[in-house]
Amino acid sequence: QHADGGTPTLFDKIINKQIPANIIYEDDTALAFRDINPQAPVHFLVIPKVRDGLTQLSKATEQQEQLLGHLLIVASKVAKQEGLDQGFRVVINDGRHGSQSVYHLHLHILGGRQLGWPPG
Ligand code: 5GP
């Protein structure tokens, strides 16, 4: 059981280094690593290291405002580090209609090619 009362996800194992991941950024509260099934030349995820109920964006509380802002700053910083100077996309899938598959909040950062809009 997870500290927040919910079911652990494989991201806990990535955070705890129990399963390997291609980690490209880490600080006290956030972790960025390459998506195992990239949908663009650059595709990485940014996650909070402590889930604390943030299984998905729709569970966010006012208390998590600073953390949520930090995840966006990390996304931008790592995008720069990855050379995405022509732009990129940030996506958060929420719930069933959002096609969320891992219930530990994560930002997708995609770039390195022209991305279509609107998404399917
Ligand atoms: P979601 O559909 O929940 O928004 O996205 C979950 C993402 O996690 C997917 O893009 C998927 O490819 C990625 N993912 C799933 N399992 C692993 C894994 O073991 N390692 C890494 N690096 N990414 C994973």
Image (spheres, rainbow, N blue to C red):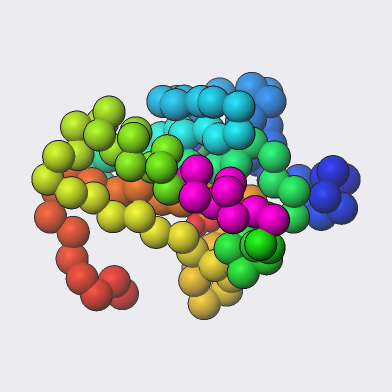
Relative placement, left or right, of 8 versus 36 is right
Relative placement, left or right, of 77 versus 96 is left
Q: Is residue 111 above or below residue 28?
A: below
Give the position of the C terminus as an image quadrant: bottom left
Relative placement, left or right, of 92 versus 90 is right
Residue 46 percent coordinates (x, y): 48, 42
Residue drawn at (43%, 48%) of the image:
72
Residue 92 percent coordinates (x, y): 46, 60
Q: Is residue 53 above or below residue 78?
A: below
Out of 22 and 89, give the one closest to the viewer.
89
Residue drawn at (39%, 59%) of the image:
91
Residue 119 percent coordinates (x, y): 29, 71
Residue drawn at (66%, 62%) of the image:
62
Relative placement, left or right, of 71 versus 76 is right
Res. 55 in view: no
Is the magenta region chiefly helix, strand or loop? helix
Residue 78 percent coordinates (x, y): 34, 33
Q: Determine the image quadrant of residue 89.
A: bottom left
Residue drawn at (87%, 53%) of the image:
5
Q: Is residue 25 above or below residue 118?
A: above
Q: Is residue 58 magenta?
A: no
Out of 29 and 116, give the one closest to the viewer.
29
Give the position of the N terminus as an image quadrant: top right
Query: Which residues are the magenta region?
Result: 63-71
Res. 108 in view: yes
